[in-house]
Image (tube, coloured by chain):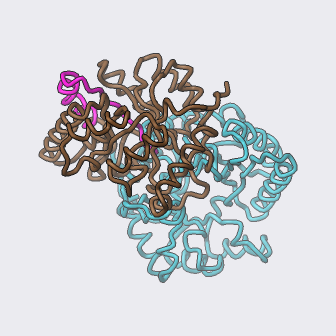
Chain colours: A cyan, B brown
Amino acid sequence: MSAKMLNDLSRLCIHTITTKPWSIEEAAIHYSKAGVKGISVWRDALHNRSIRGVATMLREHDLKVVSLCRGGFFPALDLQKRINQIDENKRAIEEAHELGAPLVVLVCGSDTEQSLEDSRKQIRDGIEAIVGEAAAAGVRLAIEPLHPMYADTRSAINTLAQANALAEVINSPTVGVAIDVYHVWWDPTLEFEIKRSGENRHLFAFHICDWNVPTTDLLNDRGIMGEGCIPVNKIRSWVEATGFEGFYEVEIFSNKYWQQDQSEFLKKIIKAYKENS
Amino acid sequence: MSAKMLNDLSRLCIHTITTKPWSIEEAAIHYSKAGVKGISVWRDALHNRSIRGVATMLREHDLKVVSLCRGGFFPALDLQKRINQIDENKRAIEEAHELGAPLVVLVCGSDTEQSLEDSRKQIRDGIEAIVGEAAAAGVRLAIEPLHPMYADTRSAINTLAQANALAEVINSPTVGVAIDVYHVWWDPTLEFEIKRSGENRHLFAFHICDWNVPTTDLLNDRGIMGEGCIPVNKIRSWVEATGFEGFYEVEIFSNKYWQQDQSEFLKKIIKAYKENS
């Protein structure tokens, strides 16, 4: 199945980290002016601000808050660190509630001081420790599988199969998955696993960007859709086939683009979104 | 199960690329003197040499040739390129035969001009096109799954599950898999898939090194065993549980170590091999 071109921006969401040099106030002005309808807010963008004030400001710019990024980082060899991190996740849920964000994205974490198996158990424990709080706050949680190159310190959940299985075992309408093409495009089971997410009603979020060829930095060398080798349109068609009606969220970490004029960068994103997303 | 320490070097093999600044003649002298028993030869190390002469030289140093690296790179959108590459693989098989290498390791390739699915089909076609030649030459072929971060240009075979499935479908005693801890350590299905390789009698080679934390370069920042976060001993115990009796091959690409004194580097490898492999 080939996906249709996206002729309007009604489902376009941008992550504040994508235009990192802008404050959230600047981002809101520019996104809104360009016709972007959704915003995913990184917690650092809220620093030293009234969260309810930011919520009001975003509403005034007709921007829907799609998610708060990010919770997670549950595993640690040290118990006290794990307890502290659960508290930190509860604060993130509270912030999401205040902001009016319906979702917290979880970058689950990994600790090289212990085995991946132990980190994986602690991730499940961590999510189970916060799911009640999240449900009470009306905030959902999305397990985001991260590319295997981040298994050392960022996430021990590295495939959509793992994220799906974890969401199944937790078995709560509050807990699902976030699919970022950057992390999963290489996976030969991807189409099957996206279908599984959808059938479970666990497909909570869909992130887009591209994989640069070559990639020069493991973290901050993502491309705009169409610049790299990810078949974003094809993967979107699989996501749409599940009945997904959420936003297409542009999340690009790029030292290269962060050094450039952010207005020009935003124009490129919107052009690429229409042609290659 | 925890693996025993390796008190002798009888199963230690080093890849010529590991000590890239050394010619194969220098490598042979130093490896042999240090008590290393196996050598895997990268094709560039044979440049401008009589292959039979190198074979004799290695025998004189009491080094067993474990494999020739590398064949593969089968996929290409362009048919003529695919045909040329099959010829190139036949030359690699011939070189392996002349060198007395019982195995050619396949880095299967990937072409961003086409889908991963197409690249995967062409990999199967490519291997099937050379398996007769390999069998006739008494040379086996090992499909090496590469880390997903290499799916763009180096290999569309990115998990041991894929490599196992491909070897099963080709279904020849000549075709198996090579397992490099660097590529597969993150995989939650790893223990299961190693068992599957073993039960199929397809576990042809085992490569070791480590994943540096942080990793600063996608290609040439591998660590010595024990320096990073890969549980090399644990993975070795899974490999040994299959009855594997081959060499433990040290394959380290490292800009850092290539700039240092290679004799000191070799000492560190041997110390680490005994303690952390």
- Name the residue rendered at 17%, 38% in the picture: B91
* Quarter of the N terminus of chain A within the rendering: top left
Q: Residue at x 25, y 31 (%)?
A: B127
Q: Is residue A5 left or right of residue B212?
A: left
Q: Which residues are magenta?
A: B122-147
Question: Viewed as shown, does residue A116 lie left or right of A158?
Answer: right
B258 in magenta = no
The x and y percentages for residue A5 are 36, 57
Where is residue A126 shown, x and y percent of the image?
78, 44
Position of B195 relative to B224 (above/below): above
Residue A154 image position (x, y, % from top left): 64, 53
The residue lying toward the viewer, choosing from A109 and B253, is B253
Count every numbered label the image shows and give the total: 0
Q: In this rendering, does residue A44 appear at all?
A: yes
The residue at 82%/59% (across/down) is A91
Up the image or down, B149 lies above or below A260; here it is above
What is the chief secondary structure element of the magenta stretch? helix
